[in-house]
Amino acid sequence: MKPLVLTSLLLALPFLSQAEFAWTNTEGKHLELSHDDTPVARYVYEAIDESTPERREETYKPFCHVYRPGSSDAFLTKGPGGKFTHHRGIYYGFSKVSYTDEDGKTHTNIDTWHCRKAHQIHRRFLKQEATVDSASFTSLIDWLDNEGNVFAKEKRTMTFSFQGKDIVVDFDSTLKSEVPEIRLDGDPQHAGFQFRAHNDVNDKTKGKTYYIRPETGAAKPGETINWSAKADSDATRDLPWKAMCVELDDKVYTVAYLDSPKNPKPARFSERDYGRFGSYFMKTVTKQAPLTIDYRLVIRPGTMTPEEVAALSQGFTTN
């Protein structure tokens, strides 16, 4: 058989076809992403259920789980419950929100972070795509105040791909105001775009968690640096990137958090040894000026060097 013919036959065999991403939707509950039948991520979007306090807590905001790379059933991220139930995987919100309505009245103490009264609701999917190279969805999310009034609408797009063994998660959001003016605020521990690792990090291995920072590199295990109004230092403000290394079931995972220079500044970072980190900013949003943000997470089984994280940041900001 001629080599060209043999090659054509081999390429036609099903078992040699290239693996693709695929979405599986459990209607009204979650959207699951897999690659070559291995789970990658789960977007949890069940609408708020106020039938009991427990059900309300489970459903008061959408968030995204990420699976441990190569695992068929174990999440890298945390869901409801555990230490600080409002910490959930990849999530976004602000603990101190106020807005001015059409009548000029100011509404205050709106908290889309803890969601004790205010909350977020996924309304519908605007798009779902999956190919050999990547997968993405766009979700329409309403932000509701303490009385259940919609004051903002968010289009949240999450895109997933691989770079070698790394899982790359792009988070793009546009928040449009339904009222004349919204003021988003909080603090680095309770606002912004954040990542929370599985609760087992808190319960079993938080003493081994360490952070990798620009300029100073890898810190000692258990050592954290957090922004303070009394010490607004360069170590916590306007960083292009930061990375966290955690241990789960004797395996190490690194999460690199990459910030776009186009995102609002100043941006102030926060770290916790139990596996929650990220940054926040303050911003005024109007009908004429929506808020658009763009972040990237790179998740690796194993460790990263400061130089590797810096290179990932450079690739993100120059593309």
Image (tube, helix red, strand yellow):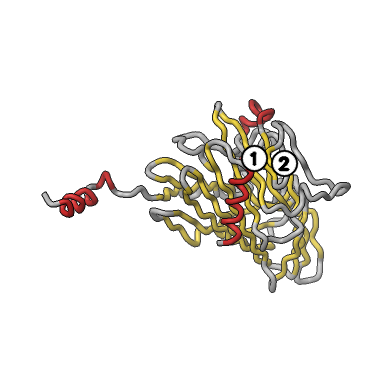
Mark 1 and mark 2 lie on one chain; the one further toward the N terminus is: 1
Q: Tell me, for residue 271, which label it has, or none.
A: 2
Element class at badge 2: strand
Could you tell me how many numbered marks the image carries?
2
Question: In the image, is residue 110 above or below residue 56?
Answer: below
| Image position, residue 188 (x, y; %) | 75, 48
Q: Residues within 10 Å of mark 2 (few under 14, many from 20)?
A: many
Residue at 75 percent across and 67 percent down: it is 181
Distance from label 1 to label 2 (Cα)?
9 Å
| Image position, residue 96 (x, y; %) | 77, 53
Tell me which amino acid carries mark 1: Met
Question: Which-is-in-front pick, marks 1 and 2?
Answer: 1
Q: Residue furthest left?
A: 1
| Image position, residue 22 (x, y; %) | 40, 50
Residue at 69 percent across and 28 percent down: it is 207
Name the residue that disc number 1 marks. Answer: 244
Residue at 55 percent across and 27 percent down: it is 249
Q: Is residue 12 left or right of residue 274?
A: left
Q: Residues within 10 Å of mark 1 (few under 14, many from 20)?
A: many
- For residue 118, say whether it is visible: no
